[in-house]
Amino acid sequence: MISKSGQGKTAVVWEDFVDDIYHLDGRLFWNKSPNNRVRVGDEVGGLNKDGYRRFKYKGSSLLVHRAIWFYLNKVWPTYLDHINRDKASNNICNLREVTRRQNLFNTTARSNNKTGFKGVSMRGSRFYAFFDGGYLGTFDTAESAALAYNTEVSKLSEIIYLNEVTQ
C-alpha cells in the first residue's frame, strides 16, 4: 500500500487511485464517478489561478502533474518540474523530479523585471548581473549582463533555465 500523507485530509492509496482514475497521454480521466456531476471518462480537474490542473480526490486537493507522477512511479515527488515550463504539458517525458533549489532556478524573469532577463538589474544606465546572491559584474547592455549570468549558470551541473539572448 503506497499512500500520501500530510498533504490533505486523507491518505491517497496507490491501489485505490489507479482503480478510480486512468492515465492517457499526460492527462487523467475518471474510471469511477466520484459524484453525480462527474461521469466516467471525464477528464480530471480544472485549471487553478496559477495555471495548473487541480482536482479533489477523497478529500485531498491534488495537482494533476504530481498525481501523474504518483500514478506512474508509485511515489509522490517532493518537487516536480515541467521541463518546458508549460504548466499544461503533463506528459511524463516533460516532468522531472528536482530539488527545491533547481525548481526555484528553473524560472523565467519575473514580470516586473525591467531588463527582461533573469539575474540582471539596471541602475542608472548600467546593467548588473547577479547569480545565487553573488555579484557577477557591471555591463553596458542588458544582453551582456544576461550572457554573464548564463555563463555562471552553465558551470553548474543542475538543470537551470538560461536567458534567451540574441546579439
Image (spheres, rainbow, N blue to C red):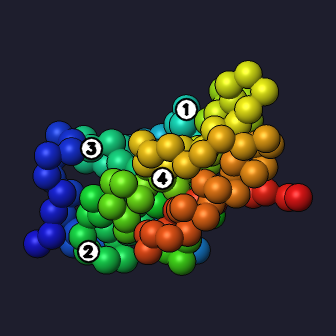
Looking at the image, can residue 82 be seen?
A: no
Residue at mark 2 to residue at mark 1: CA–CA distance: 28 Å
In the image, 45: left or right of 88?
left
Label 2 residue SS: loop
Judged by depth in the image, the label closer to the viewer, 1 or 3, is: 1
The residue located at (79%, 41%) in the rendering is: 140
Instruction: Name the kind of residue labelled 3 in the image.
Output: Ser
Judged by depth in the image, the label closer to the viewer, 3 or 2, is: 2
Residue at mark 3 to residue at mark 4: CA–CA distance: 28 Å
**Label 4 crowding class (10 Å Cα cut-off): few <14, some 14-19, many 20+?**
some
Mark with earlier residue (3, 4): 3
Label 3 residue SS: strand
The residue pinned by badge 4 equals 105
Question: Which residue is at the far right?
Answer: 167
Label 4 residue SS: helix
Quarter holding residue 96: bottom left
The residue pinned by badge 3 equals 60
The residue pinned by badge 1 equals 49
Residue at mark 4 to residue at mark 1: CA–CA distance: 22 Å
The residue pinned by badge 2 equals 74
In the image, 151: left or right of 7?
right
**Label 3 crowding class (10 Å Cα cut-off): few <14, some 14-19, many 20+?**
some
In the image, 27: left or right of 74?
right
